Amino acid sequence: MTKTSVIETTPTVLIIFGGNGDLTKRKIIPALYNLFLENRLPEKFAIIGTSRTKFTDEKYRSSLLVGINEFSRTGKAKKEDWAKFSANITYQAANIKDVASYNDFEASISKLKAEWKQDPAILYYCAVSPDLFCTIAENVSKSKLENNKDTTRIIIEKPFGRDLDSAKTLNAKLLTIFDEKQIYRIDHYLGKEVVQNVMAFRFANTIMEPLWNRTHIEHVQISVTEQIGVEDRGSYFDHAGILRDMIQNHLLQLLCIIAMEPPVNFDADLVRDKKVEVLKAMRKIIPGMIDKVAVRGQYGPGWVEGKEVPGYRDEIDVDPGSNTETYAAMKFYVDNWRWQGVPFYLRTGKRLYKSASHIIIQFREVPHNMFTNKAENLPKQNRLIISIQPDMSIKFQLESKTPGLEMTLNTVDMVFDYLGKTKIDSPEAYETLLLDVISGDQTLFMRADQVEAAWEVVMPVLDYWENNKMPDFPNYPANSWGPENAEALIAKDGFHWINLPDKNLKE
């Protein structure tokens, strides 16, 4: 273990509903284990896993160890470290719909309280189906387990509703039990290191902010592409679609970080206020415009890395006649002083050519070309490329003179490469987010009004797509860049989608 000092915080109990689930084993427990190795957890910390399955504590710990050995960024757990960490883990079988089961949690908390001689903070992690969020909240309330508004928190995973109405209902129910300061809505994209660094890059450097506006920026592209299909999520995905699953949350949150105004300071609510302002400034999409600003697609069969893969409609638990989109591309405008007239292009999809996430800031052309008219000597537009995955880097593409006797231009890169330039093993998103929950920092978590504003942005398209089937689905093969009309969406404005080569090399 490292010598980093332990965080001096209130003793903490984390109760994980869905404690035997995939999210717990792949993300939550490995993240907590890595925080433990870094000595970033409170000295007095307990984890109580719960689900309907009956386990002994030892059997439950063994099942979690398998997940850590497979998914932790620090590799297989050392015996001594695991022994110390797992001593903090217990298991209680429970029916989370039955309020009587919560008496066992109260007994466990009381026991820890007596042992620690101090009231602990209680964190309820809802790693379960969204339809159980309110049930858990209500039963926690009925059991009087949320009495301390300062130290009791509830953590919920997306989706935060299925549409605007259900999001409002969910928020209203949660807010009858918890204060907004107690609710942590996790969007793991906001915990990614490069995404967090965008705000530092923008607001900690005087060179950037004067350029960050409509005068200098021509357009913005945000791409999150996946080579995988729906895998074992067919049932969920077929009722959701990529617009709900990705654009309404992940991609719109990335847009907010790019477009937001600088807050007075890094206070959580001030930062979130600025994000809400962006969402409220986004141009409303009216029904007659939808085909001009939004494209949908669904993947068919194809070949990926030499292996034949099925089309979406042939995936397990997917309706053979499904109209669900697995690809979406959209054009947005932020109608305010800074961004008026600058298009923001968002795209995401499954079974695409490669898995990658990046943000492209395309700057305008120079107002006058003072160099020769040779094609190779025309200055290319500057680009800021923020690569989130698989590479983690920020790259600025500039024009420079090629060494030699003639004035010939060449594109050069100024690169900050996280993995190549730092000696620090970058934390996983869930490590950052869980540490923030423990610390009580809501900066990276979505607020109720932010969730609802994001739904308002996409609802016209969502409603239109659900009420108008696509006769040509599937309309793109696996291992491609998506449907042809997605290229037309951006090409009609004189641009093209920028696909980064492997290793984030220059195009």
Image (cartoon, helix red, strand yellow):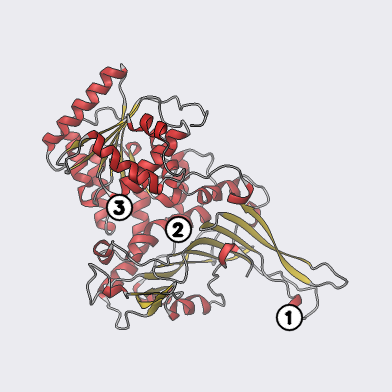
| Figure check: 473 above or below 343 | below
* Mark pair 2, 3: CA separation: 21 Å
Q: Which residue is mark 3?
A: 160
Q: Which residue is mark 1?
A: 375
Which amino acid is tagged 3? Phe
Q: Position of residue 491 (x, y in %)?
A: 52, 78
Is residue 39 at least partly visible in the picture? Answer: yes
Q: Which marked residue is nearer to the observer: mark 2 or mark 3?
A: 3
* SS for callout 3: loop
Q: For label 3, count other residues whose C-alpha is less than 10 Å away and answer few (under 14), some (14-19) or many (20+).
A: many
Which amino acid is tagged 1? Ala
Left or right: residue 413 compared with residue 12: right
Which one is in front, 10 or 346?
Answer: 10
* Mark pair 1, 2: CA separation: 40 Å
Number of dots carrying numbers: 3
What residue appears at the point 28 percent right and 27 percent down from the top-left corner? 148
